[in-house]
Amino acid sequence: MTSVALLGVKGGPAIKPGSNMPTSVLVQIAGRTILVDAGLGVTRGICDQGVDLREVDLVLITHLHSDHYLELGAFFHTAWVGGLSRPIPVIGPTGLGAFWAGFQAAMASDISLRVEDEGRCDFAALAQLSALQDGVVLDEGGLKISAMRNVHPPIDESYALCFEAEGRKIVLSGDTTYFDGMIDFADGADLLVHEVLLEEGVDALCASLGVPDGRLKRHLLRSHTSATDVGRIATAAGVKHLTLNHFVPGADPNLTDDIWADVVRQTWQGPLTLGQDGMKIDIP
């Protein structure tokens, strides 16, 4: 069965009582279990899908904003103490190696103690890091994964991902503002999972976070895709199913599901799902 599980659907790293968790996605396709991004709560989210952490075959990190890789080290450590002994490929932007080295340095006492006292395997070797770049990321066993650099200023290395196998096509937008390239990249997809921003909620979000000087607002508006533009992309690409993810704002109770859907419906009339933490979408 091909499926996409939304482990967290909130845009941004901050959480509060009642909010969703930051964005991570679990893709199961062509017999592979692939983790895309590792935001806060990802380890629990994988387990809640009934998936053993040791079953993850590949990790892809779309870009280096903390809500997309904050828990990568903890994921590996938790899998390690749970019996992980084989390396997992981790493909991500430049700089991810520094994070991996820093996590090991921060946890050096615990890691060395567990190796010596409990007989654990070498921790450092568990993550096999390589660089994420435009083009084909993997093409084997009937599965093709492609990456496309999107537009998420000021970050330069930020990517959308496409998974193709057994006649199915799944596209994850990553964090991005609107640009025409996403239409071609998502062309004919069975499922497009796209980030979404509701402009009317941005001022309240900035005020709630105590950053009223305009810089956060400017970042959000230039780096994310408005709800109407998300619908416009899905329509132009002719996708079969659109799912909203990485909601910005992601913790405003005044922005009901109906409000989000009504704005997207201005430009998209096809099947629409508003993502929720833990939601699993099967691809028929």
Image (cartoon, helix red, strand yellow):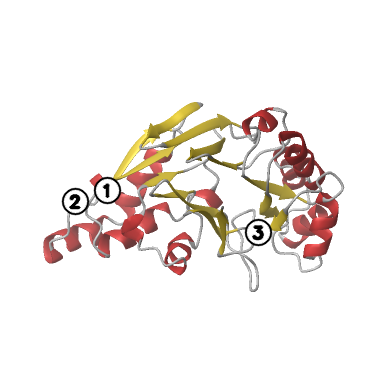
Q: What residue type is labelled 1?
A: Leu
Q: Which residue is drawn at 46% across and 54% down?
A: 1
Task: Tell me, yes or no, whether the two marked residues, 2 and 1, touch with CB atoms within 8 Å.
Answer: yes
Looking at the image, is mark 1 or mark 3 earlier in the sequence? Answer: 1
Q: Residue 126 carries which label?
A: 1
Q: Nearer the viewer, residue 99 or 187?
A: 187
Q: Position of residue 5 (x, y in %)?
A: 53, 57
Q: How crowded is mark 3: few (under 14 residues within 10 Å), some or many (20 or more)?
A: many
Q: Residue at x 63, y 42 (%)?
A: 175
List the residue tagged with mark 2.
122
Tell me which corner region of the image, top left, top right, bottom left or bottom right, holds residue 178. top right
Secondary structure beneath dot 1 equals: helix
Q: Residues within 10 Å of mark 1 (few under 14, many from 20)?
A: some
Q: Which amino acid does label 2 sit on?
A: Asp
Asked if 207 appears above or below 167 in the picture, the reply is below
Task: Please indicate whether residue 127 sits to the left or right of residue 257 in the image.
Answer: left
- Closer to the eye: label 1 or 3: 3
- Closer to the eye: label 3 or 2: 3
Could you give the CA–CA distance between mark 1 and mark 3, rounded to whole angstroms?
A: 31 Å
Q: Residue 275 carries which label?
A: 3
Is residue 255 visible in the rendered image? The answer is no
Task: Tell me, yes or no, whether the two marked residues, 3 and 2, touch with CB atoms within 8 Å.
Answer: no
